[in-house]
Image (tube, rainbow, N blue to C red):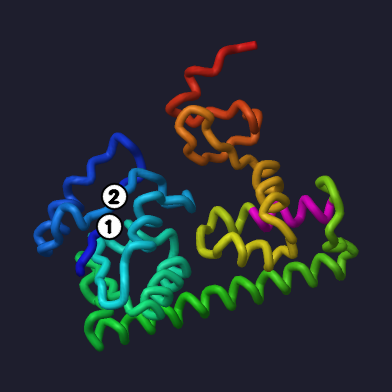
Amino acid sequence: MVFGYARVSTMEQSLDLQLDALLKEGIPQKNIYTDKVSSTKEVRKSLSKLLKYVRDGDTIVVWKLDRIARSLSHLTKLIEDFEQQGIHFKSIQENFIDTTSPHGRFIFNLFASVAQLERDIIIERTRAGLESSRRRGLKIGRKPGLSKQALHKAMLAERYYRDNKLSIEEIMKLIDVGSKKTLYKYLAYQGRRKCIECGNLFWDKRQDMDKAYCKKHKKKIKPD
């Protein structure tokens, strides 16, 4: 079977362009899954349902690659998982990505190589930066609170998180953090906030972590 996936970043945006393109590919409406959520958010309910439903021999079609993947490394991981499950993948706009054909698989392998090279470069630079910090007397240990060591990790965590090129697990490994709770504590210290009205993520150190509003809902903040 052939399935489609479409996504826009906000509730106000329309899915019509993507839906029309998927329907023109001959995909039945009932086989099209949609999300209205930012690309930076890890949880996409409809995509999760689709990935659980597809089986060996099925094909997933998207309008553009950035509708399904958060980054090149995320795209590579998705397609590698598809290949292991015998699932094909195709992009309408980037028609060179079509794992149902030998040429499409060859192009994807090139993308995968570039993604791995990018990860290797990031890891090498991080290790060099940590080694440089150690030589200057900045110890990278697991101490509570935001000491110099923790602050250094928080800055690295923010940089890699906002680059959107590595998974959460890869960031944790790179900066030597043992739990997601600690990583998100560092990100919150650096200004990562979640709007209490809509749940969207944004960055603003000035706002309280438990009472944060995105730009759209900031007008609802009442002065003390």
Residue type for callout 1: Tyr
| Left or right: residue 20 compared with residue 10 | left
- Among the two numbered marks 1 and 2 on one chain, the one whose residue lies closer to the N terminus: 1
Residue 133 visible to an observer of this rendering: yes
Q: Residue at x 10, y 63 (%)?
A: 26
**x and y, in percent, of residue 72 in the image:** 43, 68
* Residue range of the region highlighted in magenta in the rendering: 148-157
Q: CA distance from mark 1 to mark 2?
A: 6 Å
Among the 4 quarters of the image, the one containing residue 53: bottom left
Check disc 1 and report the residue beneath it. 5
Q: Are marks 1 and 2 in contact (CB under 8 Å)?
A: yes
Q: Residue at x 54, y 18 (%)?
A: 221
Check disc 2 and report the residue beneath it. 34
Above or below: residue 15 compared with residue 98: above
- Secondary structure under badge 2? strand
Quadrant where the image shows the N terminus: bottom left
| Left or right: residue 144 compared with residue 54 | right
Above or below: residue 45 compared with residue 94: above
Among the 4 quarters of the image, the one containing residue 205: top right
Residue type for callout 2: Thr
**x and y, in percent, of residue 44 in the image:** 41, 51
For the view shown, which residue lies furthest in the right direction?
A: 137
